[in-house]
């Protein structure tokens, strides 16, 4: 009987939880904005983890700076992650900005501008 979720999916889920805790409790850098981990995608061989983040209350330059800072800090974050997860090898972390939240907010703004009065019967 095949499992519903593969190992890489379970590792991705656990890694997302642990990375959120690490960024919340262990990383104390004032240059880093309010970062949210949206999704972690781990390759099937668990060698690379793509971590998609959003940075709230920041402009475009701040978002890029936070993403660059996280990529620079990835060895430190990876070391903390290795302490928390029971894996023989920890994936290489690559941080990417996820603009889906910004896109969703822009679509909602456009929809509210297109229909300023609600329809009532």
Image (tube, rainbow, N blue to C red):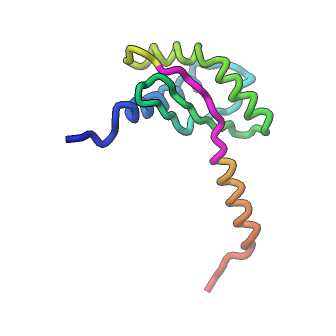
Which residue occupies the extreme left position in the image?
A: 1
Using the rendered image of the protein, determine whether residue 15 is visible from the camera's viewpoint.
Answer: yes
Query: Considering only vertical position in the picture, is 42 above or below 103?
Result: above
Q: Residue at x 41, y 30 (%)?
A: 44
Q: Is residue 101 left or right of residue 17?
A: right
In the image, residue 96 lies in the stretch drawn in magenta: yes
Query: Considering only vertical position in the picture, is 41 above or below 108?
Result: above
Query: Considering only vertical position in the picture, is 83 above or below 39?
Result: above
Residue 10, percent across and down?
A: 38, 33
In the image, residue 90 lies in the stretch drawn in magenta: no
Q: Is residue 1 left or right of residue 14?
A: left
Q: Residue at x 73, y 63 (%)?
A: 110
Along the viewing direction, whichever of 44 and 53 lies nearer the viewer: 44
Using the rendered image of the protein, determine whether residue 17 is visible from the camera's viewpoint.
Answer: no
Residue 24, percent across and down?
A: 58, 26
Q: Residue at x 42, y 15 (%)?
A: 89
Along the viewing direction, whichever of 34 and 103 lies nearer the viewer: 103
Q: Is residue 88 left or right of residue 69?
A: left
**Which of the 4 image quarters holds residue 54?**
top right
**The N terminus sits in image quarter:** top left
Which residue occupies the extreme bottom position in the image?
A: 121
Along the viewing direction, whichever of 7 and 117 lies nearer the viewer: 7
Q: Main secondary structure of the magenta part?
A: strand
Residue 97, percent across and down?
A: 66, 36
Q: Residue at x 65, y 22 (%)?
A: 71
Q: Which residues are magenta?
A: 91-100
The count of marks equals 0
**The C terminus sits in image quarter:** bottom right
């Amino acid at each position: 009987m095949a499992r519903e979720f593969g190992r890489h999916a379970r590792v991705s889920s656990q890694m997302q939880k642990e990375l959120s805790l690490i960024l919340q409790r262990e990383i104390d850098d004032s240059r880093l904005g309010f970062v949210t981990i949206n999704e972690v995608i781990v390759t099937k061989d668990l060698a690379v983890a793509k971590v998609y983040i959003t940075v709230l209350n920041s402009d475009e330059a701040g978002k890029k700076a936070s993403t660059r800072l996280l990529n620079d800090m990835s060895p430190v974050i990876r070391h903390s992650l290795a302490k928390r997860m029971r894996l023989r090898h920890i994936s290489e972390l690559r941080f990417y900005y996820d603009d889906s939240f910004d896109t969703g907010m822009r679509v909602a703004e456009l929809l509210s501008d297109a229909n300023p009065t609600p329809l009532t019967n």
